[in-house]
Image (spheres, grey):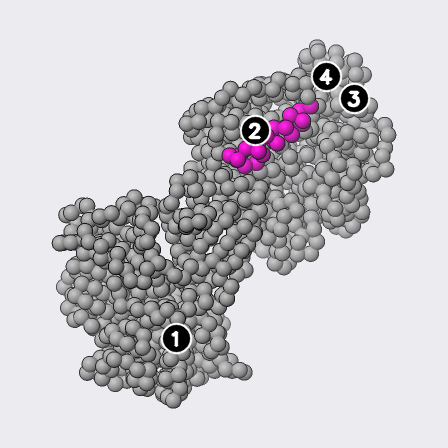
Amino acid sequence: MNEAVIPPEHPSPLQQAGVEQRDVLVGPVRIREITDLKLLRLRFIADPSNADLPTGDLPIATGQCDGTDPVILCLGPNEWLAVTGSEEPQWLSQLLQPATGATQAIAYDLTDGLVVLRLTGAAAPWLLAKLSCLDFPAGTRQGRHCARTRLGEVAVTIHYHRPAGDDWSFDLIADRSIAAYLWSLLQASAPHANELAQVSGVTQ
Amino acid sequence: MIRPPLGPFRLASGGRIDRQEPLTFTFDGVPYVGFRGDTLASALLANGVRAVARSFKYHRPRGIFSAGEEEPCALVEIGEGHARVPNCRATVVPLEEGLVAASQSGWPSVNFDLGRMVDFTHPLWPAGFYNKTFKWPNWKTWEGLVRRAAGLGRPLEGPDPDRYEQVNAHCDLLICGGGPAGLMAAQVAASAGLRVILAEQSPDCGGVLNSENIELDDQHGSDWATRTVSRLREQPNVLLLEHTVVTGVYDHNVTTLLQTGQGSTWRECLWTVRPRHVLLASGAIEQGLIFPNNDRPGIMLAGALRHYVNRHAVVPGTAVVVATNNDSAYQTVFDLLHLQVPVSAVVDSRESISPALQKRLQMAGAELIQGACISNTRGFGGLRSVRIARHEGTDLGHRACDLLAVSGGWAPRVHLLAHARGTLRFDEPSQSFVPDRLPAAWSVTGAASGMQHLQQTLDDAALAARRISEQLGHPADDLAVPQVTRGMVEPAEVGAQRPTASRKRQWIDLAHDVTLGDAELAVREGFVSVEHFKRYTTTGMSVDQGKTGNLNAFIVLGALTGRATGEVGTTTFRPPYVPVTLGAMAGIRSGEFYAPRRLLPAHLMHQKLQGQFEDYGWQRPDAYPRPGESLHDAVQREVLAVRSTVGVFDNSPIGKLEVRGPDAARFLDRVYINNVSGLPVGRVRYGLMLNENGVIIDDGVFIRLAQDRFLLNTTSGGAGRIAGMLEEWLQCEWRDLRVLVDDLTTQWACFTVAGPRARDVLTALGTDIDLAPAALPHMAAACGLVAALQSRVARVSFSGELSYEISVPARCASALLEAILAAGQPFGIEPYGIESLMVLRAEKGYLHVGTDTDGSTTPDDVGWGEVARRKAGDFIGKRSLERPANRATDRKQFVGLEPIDPGRALRPGSHLLIGADRQPPAVTDGWVTSACHSPTLDRAIGLAMLRGGRSRIGEIVTVCDEEQRFNVKVVAPVFYDPANARLNT
């Protein structure tokens, strides 16, 4: 872990950019900033002669997601993002327990470097389809998963999940510095996404 | 025939228009009335408007020739002011209430155009005339005149007010075309459970079913189309896109579709579709006939005339002649005669015609002239009569007419297939190019594949969809194919194009005014390859891309060169299939969404401090001008504040890469030209990174945080690029190293407190870090609390002053900046921006990679050669530094410049010539890379790359700044505190 200890009273990425309304409804799409999550990047430094990383229970297929708190997103080979709502990451040592001996497990706290925007509603897949070339409507059939892609010109990780009592929703995890841009882009694109959803449904 | 009040050429009944909804519109300022369901073209024809444009080159009057996107003549402007759109094809513009349309060529008007002088002097303007003529004195002399004369619309003078959208989609099957074949295939594929997207360019699906009197299962074809569309719309796995043209097919069948908004907040939407399979069901385009003066208003394609008659209830003439080389035009005759519109003659270029047709025509009472052609037409502003002759020249007299329907056969719409690199072959019976070899995951059906019979089309489309469904793992059930109970006359065998021997002009390409004479000239001049022929004559190169003329051009070229048409081949059809607006390509990416705007974590604070922002990849303040203060003055003030007291700079964008692992030092030894392994923990070093060619690609300091852990600072714009490069070396070349690279740039905010009072400010902030010079000397780092925030402090400087870089989690940025400003207030602290920083570092002679270096600069060029040479181990680019060119003594080297006149400003980019008072032309000896007025030295200074620069210290060289020449003295690049006394305070 790095040395960052975040005083809770400091502003979120959108607040820092001057965005006051951080939970909006554009037609049936709800866009909001999620600020109560901790984001940790997990990696292993392993002896190259040992091909298998001691990943324990971590998902190993790119795009796969496991767990509830923390949720572990497999972003690529030897690269995971842990998303958690708990303040004290007690789970971390357990999670990284298999990393012993010649293998060193590393967790970077990226909570301050990233922003999380959540999209929910029937038109959310079309909103994403407007900005990214991935097949989001088909993705809903796959269940929970994640992907790294570009929305407009912005690099994002998309975590597709179903919070308790909610519709399917998408968490967009992006660089903190473009939070305001992405926020505006999503809002500007939402009306057409709603139009598409009305005309075409979401199963297309 | 009864003439209704709304439009002199509108039939009293019939058509698929809503007569309950009349729409008013204007063309060239004249008000007209049409109906919902009309296109602009059909409404103009209904109102008797014949000439709607002037031709591209000769300024001849042109009317409406076709009924679809293939229109070569009727290009008009739609809208007014900034919303005006040029080059719209009137044939595909849906009529709307209040539509404003205007002709875009012809001066003073489209009906009386002085530009027609060119037509009267046409022998002076053959093909290629401008290539041959307008090169003296140069093309630029003539360009403005030629462009104005060409009359292809005017660009907008202001920002486009329309909104454009974009969307991506995936599907199993993309069907291009919503005619009978497309609808049939969609039904079958949808029933099999495929995800289907069907794109139809018209406002409604059905194709010929909506414009011909066809019956399927004893019901009108348009009713079957309407029912089928309703069923498809109910299917959740079908996306039906009307008003949508497939514009291009690219690698892996990535396909673009252009959708036109109807009553939407957006004008156009560009779809990017990634289908698993593409089914081309795009139909065929009727071709024109080549005969003298075949371009007059009143001459139109026979199929287009049927379209206007049957779909829009418009008969745009009172006396009709039909000229053809195939059977399909006979359907036009029968449809007109059915409506009691007289047809004076049917001129068929073929010697033999089926007896059944002859009999049917005889019964209808129309005169048939076989083995003949149109030998001339008359009518200054529009068609008045045609002259008919046998092929051998026997004159058969003239026929008075104001409407001539022509048909030169049908060409399958194979453009999209060609985009996907499918091949074509020439089919003699239909005299057209038809699909030959199909690309992977492609199928073609219906008229697009050369089929002429509707029943065959429907059967084949159903079969193709079943086959595709099976291939994609979704076997389809048998679906009943409707039976054609009333068809239309099909083209049958098409006669060859037989241009007459007349010396009068015979148009091949109406859009670009290319005539048979131009083709003959091109062949005489040796342009016999179809690609050369196209470029010399410009046939097929206009807005319509030769959709109604290309085939005839290929046939003519074959005839002129004694080759079969198949041997001539075709030109290359490239995307887009129809013109696509730049707005649609840009989508939402304009204005505030033109590019991502990266904000500093303390952006709001900088706004409050009146920062003047500029985009450096991040929105960063150049400086903080006070009210009434210029940017230059603000920079001078801020620089002096840093030199005299203290300043604070937001350095958050600086790249922050963490490199960890047992082999981290070994890895970085190979990355930097500097020694890394020997750096103690808690110490900082400046380093240069090279590429394999030995060229500097990045620089910055690196901090050893632990034995196996480093923090690399890269240039602000280089963080992602360098992280990617390091990852590539680790993954591809040095897989044995146990190292991880992670980009943590945005996790940390970073503020530089610089100036003689910097230590005082940090002390006032409150910190548990020992700031004593012995404990934290220049180029050292420590972690601890600063302003009660967990921080990382590095004593490094890019200003030449005592300087601390304080890094805190990004969330704390505003809090820290606020605290620094408060703590620094007693010392007169000033925030300073990028422009001020650039002056500070220029005074100190610090290199700015990308500004002072370019794609050829090596370490030795900037004075770091000795460091690179001394390093024992290998590093990226080391071998290249040994190349003779990189060791040459006359390479351009980093130096300082002082104008002889201290007030004379230097400008970056100015060239240098060795020696005083030199005058160009001469080979440049270097250039100014950075320049400013130094408030500290109160004089202009500059940094430069100069040939053999280090050996020229003290010499005078000439600066060439555009037209100005002046002398400067070459000096060492460090202007300020060369002994580094201030750094080591």
- Boundaries of the magenta span: B220-240
Which mark is drawn over residue B338?
3
The CA distance from mark 1 to mark 3 is 85 Å
Q: Chain of mark 4?
A: B
* In-front residue for pair B142/B350: B350
Crowd class of label 2 (few under 14; some 14 to 19; many from 20; radius 10 Å): many
The CA distance from mark 3 to mark 4 is 22 Å
The CA distance from mark 1 to mark 2 is 63 Å
- Identify the residue shown where x is 55% and y is 40%: A200
Q: Chain of mark 2?
A: B
Instruction: Reply yes or no: does residue B235 show up in magenta.
Output: yes
* Residue B343 visible to an observer of this rendering: no
Of circles 2 and 3, which is in front? 2
Please provide percent x and percent y for residue B348: 71, 20
Which mark is drawn over residue B370?
4
Disc 1, SS: helix
Q: Which residue in the protein does label 2 denote?
A: B182
Sequence-first disc among 3 and 4: 3
Please provide percent x and percent y for residue B118: 71, 45
